[in-house]
Image (cartoon, coloured by chain):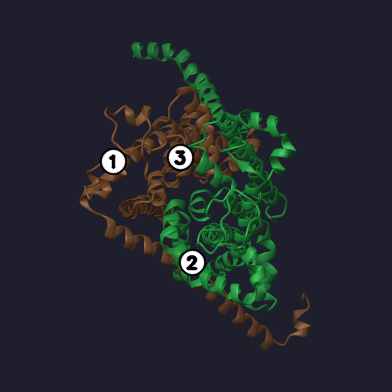
Chain colours: A brown, B green
Amino acid sequence: MKNFSEHKTLWQRNLWDRFMVALLTFSTIMVMLPLLIIIGYVVVNGISALNWDLFTQELGSPARAMQGKSTGLIHTMLGTAVVDLLAIIIAAPVGLGAGIMLSEYPDHKLNPILRVINDTLNGMPAILKGLLAFALIVKPMGTFSGLSGGFALAFVMIPIIARSTESALMSIPWSIREAGLAIGLPRWRVVLSTVMPAARTGLVTGFLIAFARAAGEAAPLMFTSFGNNYLPNHWTGMILGPVDTLPQRLYSLAISPYKEWHELGWAAGIVLLGFVVTLFIIARMLTREKNYD
Amino acid sequence: MKDKQKEGISKKPLGIIYRWLGDRIFFTLAFALGLTIIVLSVSMAWVLSDESSLAFKEFGIGGFLTGTTWNPGVGLKFGALPFILGTMVTSVAALAIAFLPAIAIGIFIAEYAPKWIGSIIDNLIHLIAAIPSVVVGIWGIFAFAPWMRESVYIPVFNWTANNWPSLLPVLGNPMGYGIATATIILALMIIPFTTVLTRDAISKVPREQREAAWALGATRWEVIRMAVLPYARGGILAGVMLSFGRAIGETMAVAMLIGNKNTLPFTIIGPAATMPSVIINEFREAVGSLHVSSLMGIGLVLFVISLTVNLIAAYITRKLSATGGQLV
């Protein structure tokens, strides 16, 4: 293999090169096609299932849909907003702090182990984060709740935010920090007033990516926020009682035996996909802007 | 003038507080928040082992891991083997399917494609990797599984029934929801992930490395094979390990498509179950404490397996990659 030139003529080597180009192009197309078909299928079916009731009505019992009465997922969308916001509120400080720890105190003894554990936590199946939130929040509270769902999603977000914060802050050169220290700023002011503003695009991108990733997770929510067919009577029910979220509702709709609910499932699918993809595209565009600077 | 001086003097102790105490507080906060992540991970292990202790006490560690009966209804016997095997079979098969195509796309984007095509595919792959698992699942449940049943499984089943009836028990029930369907979907779902990691590993290869090979008169493929891939192999391997971890933990799409049959033996296209899928399916409805504890036990097994996979990935990036660099 190593002495290829002794065994193969230039013509053979060029032929092999062409063959590999063709093979790689072919496999790229072959893999991209089914993936694009999935997106196309979900978009077409989802858009045809969209209607106004979806955004104004609550789901109710299966009978309601089977009798042809109008049903929707307004409680699901509100619930998703509440749970996701709770999650980012819980996760942002922890992720940010850990990211600062990793990037601003690079020689600290905690960091090598923190980095490995953070990556491991990131690679842990989301369902285990749901079990953790179940044991830590649901059991003591005695009820499924939006809060526990927020915690479960926060466990998904935290390692992502920590990693992205670290790399965003690391991308700011040390000379900026030294300049701050040289004019007599204390270290914490240097980080807060010079490094973090300079890295804000990267920080926001990290938050968005973590948010998009967590917003699509259903597994941690199945036994934390649990699901609910109705709007709660009082807004606190969104936080302290069982609450519906899009990914978990989509799963429940899809495995339900009712045809009407399958339609709603497609609608939930396109709303969820649209939400996640929008967040994601904003994040990508921010990254690109950063690269052009 | 005098006032100002006075003010400056009186501010001095404040300045010390502002500098020294501010730094202390800031560091302590960052340290505490970093520690939170470690505490979270440790408490995950602790919670899972604590909650599952009942099941392990009842059946013994070996008995739980190798038990083949999972019967929450009558008898209350819980053995995790069907799910461990189910997870392993689907993940390994999915990785085997996804491995080469994913690396091929990674190479194609990084080395061959014109810049604009490369960036389009790159963006698409990132986008596809961001699609929630349930959305893929709904496509699988309503479009892919019925299609597979009608145009693949039933013809294959009929052909086997006519020509090779003894193979039928191996082939399994052609209901559409089963190991084969779940594996294909799983492969499709981890391809973008592996591709992104492969691409990252390849783009970290320094230009000089390639230029040296070009200067020796290598063709483009030879540059990739001899200069780029050996350099990036650590990153690629670690990426493959991480994708494997993803496949093991992938829950929703698999739970929707695998058919959820809790007993051995498995068949090729027949239903089965994985560790995440059984937790998702039964945890909400589990009443008996032994049932809950057994599900937590499966969670613990899942935890240990993905911990191992992730640590191996971290190890590979540290030891094998030429840069010895960061985890992607």
**Mark 3 surroundings: few (<14), some (14-19) or many (≥20) residues within 10 A:** many
- Are the numbered discs 3 and 1 placed on the same chain, yes or no? yes
> Residues at badges 3 and 2 in contact (C-beta under 8 Å)?
no
Task: Report x, y in % for residue A54.
Answer: 25, 48
Give the answer, above or below, for where B146 lies relative to A206.
below
Task: Report x, y in % for residue A164.
Answer: 50, 44
Q: What residue is shown at x 58% (from left), y 43% (from top)?
A: A124
The label on residue A222 is 3
- Mark pair 2, 1: CA separation: 33 Å
Tag 2 secondary structure: helix
Judging depth in this view, the residue of A107 and B226 nearest the camera is B226
Tell me the quadrant of the picture where the N terminus of chain A can be found.
bottom right
Q: Is residue A241 left or right of residue A181?
A: left
Please name the amino acid that badge 1 sits on.
Gly
- Mark pair 3, 2: CA separation: 29 Å
The label on residue B149 is 2
Q: Which residue is mark 1?
A: A60
Q: Is residue B100 left or right of residue B148?
A: right
